[in-house]
Image (cartoon, rainbow, N blue to C red):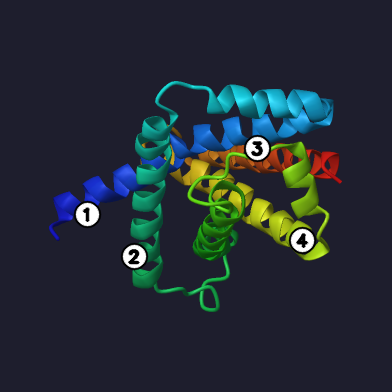
Amino acid sequence: MTVTHTFFWRKLHSLSGILPLGIFLMVHLFINSMATLGIEDFNRGVALLHSIPYLWFLELVVIFIPIIYHALYGVWLVYLTKNNTLNYRYFRNWLFYLQRVTAIITLLFVIWHVAVLRFSEGFINSNLDFEFVRTALNEPVILILYLFGMLASFGHFANGLWSFLVSWGVTVGEQAQRTAAYACFAVFIILTAVGINALLAFI
């Protein structure tokens, strides 16, 4: 693979983590957060989402294909990466390492999440409602797995957002990158708070 091709695929990998996957993460979190408003509101939100015309096509093009590409290329990058956190114990170097760790955890979590909720009953689960999710999350093991999976996903996204801003030339200079780091950490905290609040609404 030439340098030009490598540059292109890395840029596309970085972009796909924000658009469309980052947007999908926000929409998914918003729908889950409707559980805080009550059973009927959550079920109404899920029903509205499932009533979108050509949903299967949108899921394939906007969600599954980008996820598959981002995951496969990400695993390839993890394989190529030589971790040197013991030799260079800088904070940013540790974040670089954690980005690879959370990538694997997030990938396993997404596969498990889709298998449990999206394709658990036949080919496509058509009975996804508040009661279905509440029954699943009232199992302590599943709840803990979801909690760790969410934390890994949010951490991976927030750290990836910082890397995206740097690699795409949005934040140039040490001060800009430091400010972006604080902002991305705030994104992680907000996503975590919203995600945990949504989980608790089902319990």
Residue at the farthest front position: 122
Residue at which label 3 appears: 187
Q: Nearer the N terminus, badge 1 or badge 2?
A: 1
Q: What is the spatial separation of the Cα atoms under label 1 and label 4, in whole angstroms?
A: 38 Å
- In the structure shown, which secondary structural element does the residue marked by tag 3 occupy? helix
Task: Please identify, in this view, whether the residue under mark 4 or under mark 3 is nearer the observer.
Answer: 4
Q: Is residue 190 or residue 131 the one in the foreground?
A: 131
Q: Which residue is painted at 86% across and 46% down in the image?
A: 203
Which mark identifies residue 144?
Answer: 4
Q: What is the spatial separation of the Cα atoms under label 1 and label 3, in whole angstroms?
A: 29 Å
Q: What is the spatial separation of the Cα atoms under label 1 and label 2, in whole angstroms?
A: 12 Å
Residue at which label 1 appears: 6
Q: What is the spatial separation of the Cα atoms under label 4 and label 3, in whole angstroms?
A: 22 Å
- Check disc 1: other Cα within 10 Å, few if <14, some if 14-19, many if 20+: few
Q: Which residue is painted at 41% across and 34% down in the image?
A: 56
Q: Which residue is painted at 35% across and 44% down in the image?
A: 65
- Check disc 3: other Cα within 10 Å, few if <14, some if 14-19, many if 20+: some
